[in-house]
Amino acid sequence: MTRSQMPEGLTPRGGTPEFTEATLPGALKSDHSLAAGRWGRLHVLEGRVIFVDDSSGERFQLVGPCEFDIPPEAVHHLELDGPLSCRVDFFGEEKPPKPNNEAT
């Protein structure tokens, strides 16, 4: 995976709480991916973490404070590299408005 940049025009879709090296969930340390159409932005607030692209084996050492965009369906995991404070925000395309079923 080449380092991706999130496209413009996406809307926020929630996020995780802040994690430390002690509270980082095992699921983030194992192979996983985001759903189709959903982007993530990893915020490394303090410390260091390694983002691993499991398809290519490419490794990105991230040192806080920094941000790293994660594209949809990219299989990846995180490896701890000492003390850490981080969170992930999620983004997606704006959902079209629901049709108005009221009779006019």
Image: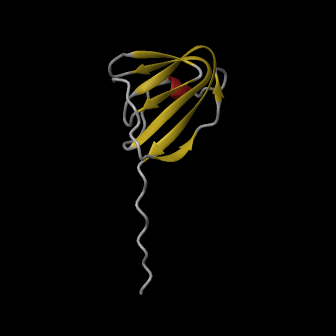
Query: Quadrant of the image for the N terminus?
Result: top left
Give the number of marks. Answer: 0
79 lies left or right of 100: right
Compare residues 5 and 56 and report the one nearer the observer: 5
What percent of the width, then of the height, locates residue 17?
64, 36
State left or right for residue 80 relative to residue 4.
right
Quadrant of the image containing the C terminus:
bottom left
In the image, farthest residue toward the top: 82
Q: Position of residue 10 (x, y in %)?
A: 43, 46
Image quadrant in which you'd find residue 58: top left
Can you say whether 7 is above or below 80 in the image? below
Residue at position x 51%, y 47% in the image: 13
Residue 57 in percent (x, y) is at 36, 16
- Whether residue 90 sits left or right of residue 37 in the image: it is right
Q: Position of residue 43 (x, y in %)?
A: 56, 29
In-front residue for pair 63/75? 63
Does 31 sit left or right of 55 as displayed? right
Colour scheme shown? secondary structure
Which residue occupies 46% across, 24% down? 77
